[in-house]
Amino acid sequence: MKRFLFYFAVTGWTLGLIVHLLSLADFDITDKVPFVWVLHIGIFVVWLPTVLDLKKNEELKAYQQSGMLNRMNPFAFFKIIFRQTPTWLTIIAIGGFFYAIINFMLFMTSQLGVTDIKDGQYILHNHGQLIKTLTEQEYHHFKANEVRGFSGHWLAFYGIAAAVLFPFNRQETNE
């Protein structure tokens, strides 16, 4: 089962990367593939088992019970949860985590409101207050930007899940 979830996470990460790259190219994938938002649900499919797997980790439990100064070192935390993970996958997971933070901050500063179609017009609004009427091109630009904001998180969550669930470690092959 862990192996299946690992491959599920890798698939989610790969699809998230494709969507993210398309959104960076200002392509509104939701216009052609509206079910792309299913990638949100997939995160829960892999994260529940990931969290349960981490709860069984005795070294992580000891780390969490150690002093506050010890827990302030994120590298010690990453070293524990990625102990059996290959370096290349650890780099992808940690890089994706930090990239998601930066991407989210950029998204929040660039997204002025929510896009919608009302009475046949493309609009940008914030809490029901009209900000501006958009052209079709502007509408798709804002939609692509919205997808970019979410897909950055997909990269982080699927990447970390894949790294934690990585099934090809020495313990598994010896058992």
Image: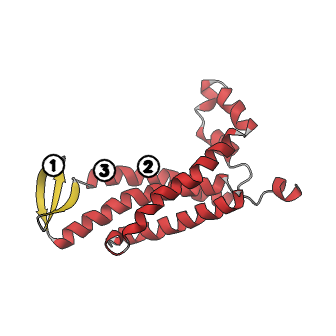
Which numbered disc, 1 or 3, marks the residue that appears first in the sequence? 3
Can you identify the residue that label 2 sits on? 101
Placement of 140 over or under 110, stated as above or below: below
Instruction: Name the residue at 21% across, 67% down.
Output: 139
Give amino acid for label 3.
Answer: Met
Can you identify the residue that label 3 sits on? 108
Q: Nearer the viewer, residue 106 or 137?
A: 137
Q: Nearer the viewer, residue 170 or 8?
A: 8
Can you identify the residue that label 1 sits on? 128
Instruction: Name the residue at 59% across, 60% down.
Output: 9
Q: Residue furthest top?
A: 67
> Residue 18: image x %, image y %?
46, 71
Placement of 93 over or under 65, stated as above or below: below
Placement of 70 over or under 12, stated as above or below: above
- Gap between marks 1 and 2 measured at Cα: 28 Å
Per the image, label 2 sits on a secondary structure element best described as helix
Q: Are marks 3 and 2 in contact (CB under 8 Å)?
A: no
Position of 103 with respect to 120 (left or right) is: right
Position of 108 with respect to 97 (left or right) is: left
- Gap between marks 3 and 2 measured at Cα: 11 Å
Residue 55 at least partly seen? yes
